[in-house]
Image (cartoon, helix red, strand yellow):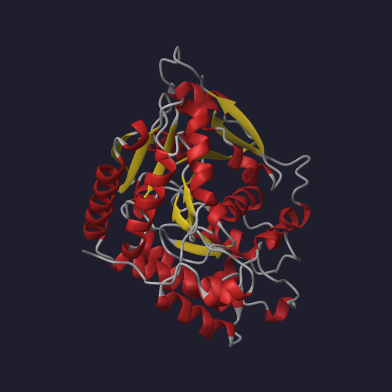
Amino acid sequence: MTTIDARPTTDPLLAALGLRPVINVAGSVSRLGGTTLAPEVREAMAAAATSFIPMVELQAWASEAIAEATGAEAGCVASGAAACLFLASAACLARLDPGVMDRLPDTAGIPNEIAVHRAHRNPYDHAIRAAGATFVEFGYLGPANPGTRRWQLEAVLSERTVAVFYPGAVTAGVLPLAEVADIARARGLPVIVDAAEMVPPVSNLRHFIAEGADLVAHSGGKAVGGPAASGFLAGRRDLILSASAQQQDMYVRPASWPGPQGGDSRDALPDPPQQPIGRIAKVGREEIVGLVVALRRYLAADHGARRARWASLGEQIRGAVNGVGGAAAAVFEDHDVAIVEIAVPGGPTAAARVIARLRERDPRVWAGEEFVDQGAIAINVQHLRDDEVEIVIEQLRHALAAG
């Protein structure tokens, strides 16, 4: 059975600082810090932390690794998937025009519309709008929606359109990504994809570029196993150069400006912009190095063995808690990861009470809340260590039996 990095449930250093870690069965969620870092990732970040490396060179190095992993022309690293979406929006608004970069998020008098299906609106799209873009919606919602037609997207595209936004999660009633990309390409418009939570499977690293997306934002601090404050943007080279330039420190003289990623990138943007809006998406050298090492490690992993391990853990937990306190447990798979859904007698109130009890125990167990409104709790095994399985089972049985 494949194991994951061993670490104490209560680290002495954290205890001395007054901090109490939890056992994570909620998944790769930002509220718990995303993921944990493998030893080689930690070591690479520590090495980067003790050295100075030009950020342009680091981003160029990362671009090659991201391109190799995704099939895109280029890539850059930012402080998370939301930061990558923000930079993607800024890149589509400004392209390689330093004058437009200088005025964002003020888009008065310049094209600033991004088309999006109504079904694709979500709380995370703040990141797209924050750069100065305005959404123009198309399509319909609800059970009466017979499916989106090409003309509905085509009808909202105009001289004010700069891009089309497309979250990667499967959504009923919307145009397929490949068709959206085909429509956008005919108008010379890029497609931005939010793929923050689309890995695993590992194939999704390449899927959206292959389907025609021009910019794809991925989380670095979740399944890929990189630092929590990292994400990577993959896509068209000209747009990546714009995104990269708008993030970097621009206290630089034009004569010494190496371009956004060195080499011939200066040919695309010969005059440096001055501290563009993307500085709020700043990423450190430690995060860039850690992300690239984690990405290469993730690509080399035995994903079949991981999936089998998760399935085995899910069945082990299901069998141990099914029927306790009248609970009904079942296992399903989401993005290759086994999820144990435990329905609790008493509905949403009872499910919320079980989650609260798990958090009050010692050691604390953090379960998923996504099914609480249906009277159930979720146990995601993705980050569960072998030595934590029996602890989780014991804590679950106690919380369920308490009623």
Point out the residue furthest to the bottom here: 51
Q: Tell me the residue at 47%/22% (across/down).
A: 151
Q: Tell me the residue at 49%/69% (across/down).
A: 10
Most foreground residue, 329 or 260: 329
Height in image: 146 above or below 226?
A: above
Most foreground residue, 339 or 254: 339
Left or right of 136 in this view: 335: left
- Which image quarter is the N terminus in? bottom left
> Residue 356 at x, y = what percent?
54, 43
Most foreground residue, 281 or 301: 301
> Residue 358 at x, y = what percent?
48, 48
Q: Tell me the residue at 29%/38% (across/down).
A: 322
Height in image: 43 above or below 293?
A: below
Please say whether residue 71 is visible from this viewpoint: no
Left or right of 249 in this view: 237: left
Q: Tell me the residue at 34%/51% (across/down).
A: 393
> Residue 287 at x, y = what percent?
55, 71
